[in-house]
Image (cartoon, rainbow, N blue to C red):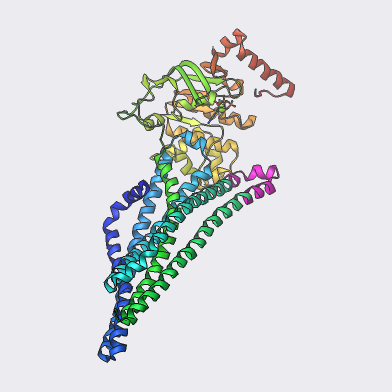
Amino acid sequence: MNLYVRILNYIKPYLHRLIAAAVCTALAAAGNLYLPWIIKDVVDQVLAEKNAGMLNWVCASIVIIFFLRGIFYYGQNYLMSYVGERVIIDIRGAVYTKLQRLSVAFYDKNKTGTIMSYVTNDVSALQSAMVQNTIEMITEGCILIGSIAAMFYLDWKLTLFTFGTFPAVLFLMDLFGKKIRVAGRRIQECTADITSVLQETISSSRIIKSFVREDYEIDRFNKENLANFSANMRNAQLMALLTPVVECVAAIGVTAIIWYGGRSVIDGEITAGSLVAFLVYAVNISNPIKRLTRVIGSIQKALAAAQRVFDVLDLDEVIKDKPKAEDLPNISGKVVFDNVGFSYNPEDPILRGISFSAEPGQVVALVGPSGAGKSTIANLVPRFYDVDYGSITIDQHNIQDVTVASLRRQIGIVPQETTLFNGSVYANILYGRLDATQEEVELAAKAANAHNFIMELPQGYATALGDRGLNLSGGQRQRIAIARAILKDPRILILDEATSALDTESERIVQEALDRLMVGRTAFVIAHRLSTVQNADKILVLDHGCIAEEGTHQELMAKQGLYAHLHEIQYKTAELKGEPVCTI
Ligand SMILES: Nc1ncnc2c1ncn2[C@@H]1O[C@H](COP(=O)(O)OP(=O)(O)OP(=O)(O)O)[C@@H](O)[C@H]1O
Ligand SMILES: [Mg+2]
């Protein structure tokens, strides 16, 4: 019930159109209802009394009724489709808006394909149900009610007799309705699984090919495809069963009418025309009942989809502004972690009692073994996740008390794997600050050591990047990302392994751009190659979610602790391999 109310809320803005559509529907249905009445006149007056004048009248009215019915039919379909399609784009827009607002944790937990399926498959399932089924339901409902009224008017005893079969029909409809709803939910889930496999495998085509796992993936897809088939067949089976069952019950009813009504005509209680008209109405109601059961079936299926859509709309955004949050003013960039604790899952603490401070303009390096929690610390600053305890302040503003947008606007992030969007090189850099001028974009590209290679591309800045910019090298992608960050001009910078994926030569070019980018900003630099962080103002050595050591390169080397140990391993390995630098 709650679901209907929520869908109705979306319909509300288009209520006047819906009412107009309902009026058209009712009038079109009235046209249907009038026809049996004409048959009654044909039998009782034209045929029985041989009234030629009446015949002309009857024929003329049939043509007029069909003409008017056509006009109302058009109005009904046009208006209903309008309302249905509007409601759907509103819902789809709401789901997309919600997806944009949901925190990073939501994207950690859900597969991309499943999320995509909410916006595509589920909303579409809702769409077909909304448009087609609402029309049918109103039309058939009108015909049903009108027919029943006409039947009562013709012969109430016969009508009551006829409806002896009704409770059985209602019971069956309810029973099937529930089963079909379960089947519908299963179909939507299976479709989401298929979308998910599809998305995953399309975006990882290189990995699949490199491991020669095409056949494995085909098998996996076929399995999901088959599951989808089973789910659809379960639904089809229910639907296929529903119609004959209801029809059988209806046939028994019609037979009963013929038997009982026939006796009434023989006894002279009603006219032959009335019985014929009554029978046409009775057959007429078997149609709406049949269609209504089918419509109720697809509405149940659509409700299952609606449930999934509303489940997403109801999700907690987790990271959101406090009721009276104010914008973070322009900061100088002092960042203080005070006894910060954090876990992705409550039972598995990742960070424990992290305390440190970064002065404006300082470069703070985070080093330590893999899984120590370096990226996690970096993720807490822009509030991709909120701390469990303790606090993070920027220029004395607790980051949880200011608006998320104003916080993130002042933070730039260059990750290891840059995501570029489909579109031109220019558009990708402009993403950093949408109102930047062409000159500013080019300046940023120059500072990022990207201008030269961009000019060598076929169309320079206008060159379109393919899917996720995969037609550029890793170093080129990284330099575009840096240009984007330079354009954004944030006070705080997070470089999470920004050069780790690059070879020595392109690392040198990118590092040069990064050094330029870091000037005058508070920078958090995460790096495996310790040589890249030697000049940092402060180095935090993380181990198992705690800060094991803290200081400058010289201080830490003198300490002969974990940092010195890590450093030693790196240089030993590097010497063995004959490389200047190497990773832990
Ligand atoms: N989204 C997540 N959900 C659950 N656990 C996570 C998530 N991200 C990271 N972790 C866990 O948190 C711990 C710290 O991860 P983090 O990414 O901060 O490590 P890191 O120090 O950056 O390691 P690396 O040097 O390999 O990048 C790891 O044990 C990891 O398994
Ligand atoms: Mg990391």
Residue 494 included in the magenta stretch of the image: no
Of residues 188 and 326, the one nearer the viewer is: 188
Taking depth in this image into account, of 60 and 249 the one nearest to the observer is 249
Q: From the viewer's side, name the closer residue of 530 and 19.
A: 19
Q: Position of residue 581 (x, y in %)?
A: 66, 23
Query: Relative to residue 314, is residue 525 depicted above or below?
Result: above
Give the residue displayed 27% in from the left and 90% down from the top. Answer: 51
Q: Nearer the viewer, residue 408 or 317?
A: 317
The quadrant in which residue 269 appears is bottom left
Main SS of residues in magenta: helix
| Residue under the point 49% across and 20% down | 363
Question: Does the stretch in magenta take in 219?
Answer: yes
Q: Residue at x 37, y 20 (%)?
A: 395
Q: Which residues are magenta?
A: 200-222
**Residue 353 visible here:** yes
Count of numbered tags? 0
Q: Position of residue 221 (x, y in %)?
A: 62, 49
Q: Quadrant of residue 254?
A: bottom left
Q: Residue at x 49, y 37 (%)?
A: 107
Left or right of residue 464, residue 151 in this image: left
**Depicted 532 relative to depicted 249: above or below:** above
